Image (tube, rainbow, N blue to C red):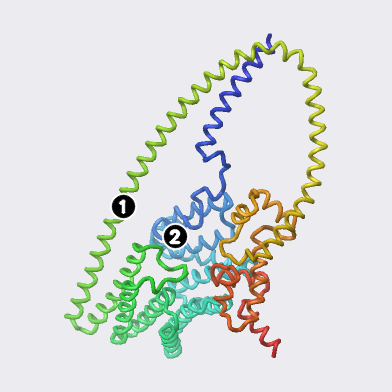
Amino acid sequence: MRQALHLILFIVVAAIVGCTGKNAQESKGNGREPLPSDTVYTQQAAMAVYGYQPERALQIIDSAVIVGNLSEVRAEVERARIYSKTQIKARMDSVLGGPKGTSLDSGRVIGERVLGHDSLKQDLNLRQQLLEVLVYTARMQQDTLKWMQRSRELIDVCHREGVETEALRTEAELGAARCYDGQAEQGMATLDSVIAVLGTMPEFKFNELDAFIIVSKRKIGVLSSTGRYVETLPLARRIIERLEDYEAHPDQYADDSKRVPADSASRASYINFYRTQAQGYISAAYTALGQHSSMTEAYLQIERSVTEATARDHIARYNALEQRMQRQEAEARAEREQARADRNLLIAFGTGILLLLAVTAQLVYWRQKRIINRKNRVLVKQMKQIDSLTTVQESATEDDALYNHLRDVILAEQLYLNPQFGRQAIIEKFQLSKERIGAVFSQGSDHSSLTDFVNNCRLDHARQLLTNPQLSIDEVAQQSGFGTRQTFSRNFVRRFGLTPTEYRSQLSATAE
């Protein structure tokens, strides 16, 4: 009888746990296990707040490393960026317990330490980002020698990556540093050369616009430091003219630059920020030249820009309030659904009690069958062990065969040329699970993953296209299935040790 009571208690507990467990899984989203990417601890989240919440950004970076969203090397690069480029350096200096400039020192130390890491020798894009931080830090610390040294290194990396506009931007940094280092003639010639090249580029997109503004600002800074205010006026006005054209025709400037504003509000803030700076340069020039009427007009333009920015801020706050009300309504609906789920749980529990009464009537019969069932379970367990060994052997053979089939279809139909081709496309075309696809490519092939296989197919196709001199590198990237030239160049260098341009040059030299 005691055993019967134990069995009843076990069934009651199992019923309760089963109901609550199911309800909890449904609240997580169809029983799916949480993934690291489900968290808010990502690089994007940290970079969205680091300007005015550096402490929060550092916490997000640390948590991203813990949950596996970020490598330690990448995290160090982002920490250097946060320390160096936060807009509230004074507060960051206080947090670090040091005098003015402590945050810049911390960013420089972290950046220089990680610069020698082996992974940055292969990942040129990450190395470029780190060098951009170090160039900025050296400029802010007025360390002219370091400014020039890091600028030269960054120019070399940009050329190796094939991002010429970024190289021009850094050429301007080098030119400005030379001016402040006493090489005024050589430095000014570099700044003028970069401005001229940017002005004559066949495609003047957002990346070129942003580079032109930064280069013009560097030249204006050099001219102002030497009292050549008259020469700053045309540069400042050209900045305003370019911004007005961008404001009127934003679609004509669209590109895949990492700096391009994400939406119309960000675009308006970008235009207002640099327009206000340019108007400030004009005002400062007229003040220094004693032309007070023009100075008054410049001040009025600045005031109008500030008024427009304030209006946009009020609109943004209204939208945020509206979104908060929508979230509150969603939470109220969730509470009602939870109450309904609790009621269903009570009904299920009552049903379970009724089932227990029926189970009790079978206890005598189960007791007589217990010994036989125990022997049967041992036998079934032994049979399952034998079946599992056979299944493992058969699975390895099936992985090889399935991989060969998938490979032949993908190559024959050139599915990899579609930039959107990936795991989901295979799932839909071949009706396979994502786990099965992962096993096929990691265990049934020489590739570490499906992504590795697809990239190799695209790179092999790209090598064939590079033999055609009529195709540009951008066209080769697009026709090979890569979304952008930067992604294509990075993968090409990782596999072949050469940029696409260098590879094509070698082909030409061999042909000659």
> Can residue 181 be seen in this snapshot?
no
**With respect to residue 68, does 28 lie above or below?**
above
Q: Quadrant of the C terminus?
A: bottom right
Q: Are marks 1 and 2 in contact (CB under 8 Å)?
A: no
**With respect to residue 45, does 364 lie above or below?**
above
Image quarter for residue 351? top right
**Residue that label 2 marks:** 98
**Residue that label 1 marks:** 319
Who's the residue at 62% across and 77% down the image?
Answer: 500
Give the CA separation, mark 1 to mark 2.
39 Å
Who's the residue at 59% across and 57% down the image?
Answer: 71
Q: Is residue 406 toward the left or the right of residue 54 in the image?
A: right
The amino acid at mark 1 is Asn
Q: Quadrant of the N terminus?
A: top right
In-front residue for pair 112/122: 122
Q: Position of residue 238 (x, y in %)?
A: 32, 81
Bin the neighbour count of mark 2 within 10 Å (Cα to Cα): few under 14, some 14-19, many 20 and up.
few
> Can residue 217 be seen in this snapshot?
yes
Bin the neighbour count of mark 1 within 10 Å (Cα to Cα): few under 14, some 14-19, many 20 and up.
few
In-front residue for pair 206/225: 206
Q: Secondary structure at mark 1?
A: helix
In-front residue for pair 6/188: 6
Q: Position of residue 73 (x, y in %)?
A: 59, 61
**With respect to residue 393, does 156 lie above or below?**
below
- Mark 1 vs 2, N-terminal side: 2
Q: Position of residue 388 (x, y in %)?
A: 79, 39
Q: Position of residue 501 (x, y in %)?
A: 61, 80
